[in-house]
Image (tube, grey):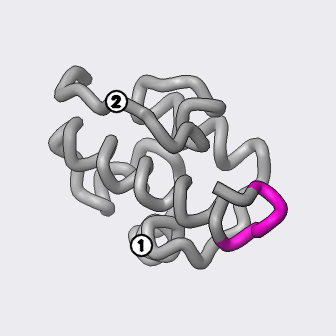
Amino acid sequence: MDWSDPQAARQVLANNVRRLRRARGLTQEQLGEKTDLRQAHISEIEGGGSNLTLDRLQSIAAALGVRPMDLLDEKLKVSNRA
């Protein structure tokens, strides 16, 4: 990935959030409840259209049971653990 391209980084984040959320058996609404975000914002994140703050990144990572840096890992392996 070209890390100088913000859209590419957002797409990696989007893919990982979506994959982890599904692996954890969560809906977008449930993830939103765990992170105090609206379902529409979770949808925007998963669509690659949201530029997150570090606080939001940390909140999402904690809710999904991973480290914030994992959400930007292109080769993240996703397991079905909660």
Look at label 1 and name its amino acid.
Ser
Dominant secondary structure (helix, strand or loop) of the stretch shown in magenta = loop
For marks 1 and 2 on the same chain, the one whose residue lies earlier in the sequence: 1
Label 1, label 2: how many angstroms apart (C-alpha)? 22 Å
Question: Residue 5, which numbered label?
Answer: none
Between 77 and 48, the one lying in front of the other is 77
Q: Residue 42: x, y in percent?
A: 45, 65
Classify 10 Å Cα crowding around label 2: few (below 14), some (14-19), many (20 and above): few
Q: Please give left or right for residue 18 compared with residue 53 in the image.
A: left
Q: Magenta segment, which residues? A: 3-7
Q: Position of residue 55 (x, y in %)?
A: 74, 43
Question: What secondary structure is marked by label 1?
Answer: helix
Side (left or right) of 35 relative to 6: left
Q: Most extreme residue toward the right, as rendered?
A: 4
Question: Can you identify the residue that label 2 sits on?
Answer: 77
Identify the element where label 2 is drawn.
loop
Q: In the figure, is residue 65 to the left or right of 10? A: left
The quarter of the image holding the C terminus is top left
Q: Looking at the image, which residue is at 34% across and 30% down?
A: 77
Q: Who is closer to the viewer here, 44 or 8?
A: 8
Residue at (35%, 55%) from the top-left corner?
A: 18
Q: In which quadrant is the N terminus drawn? A: bottom right
Q: Residue 20: x percent and y percent?
A: 33, 41
Question: Given the current orientation, which residue lies at the most extreme front position?
Answer: 2
Dot 1, how many residues are within 10 Å of its Cα: few (below 14), some (14-19), or many (20+)? Answer: some
Q: Is residue 44 left or right of residue 1?
A: left
Q: Which numbered circle lies on residue 43? A: 1
Decide whether residue 4 is among the magenta residues: yes
Q: Amino acid at mark 2?
A: Lys
Q: Residue at x 40, y 69 (%)?
A: 39
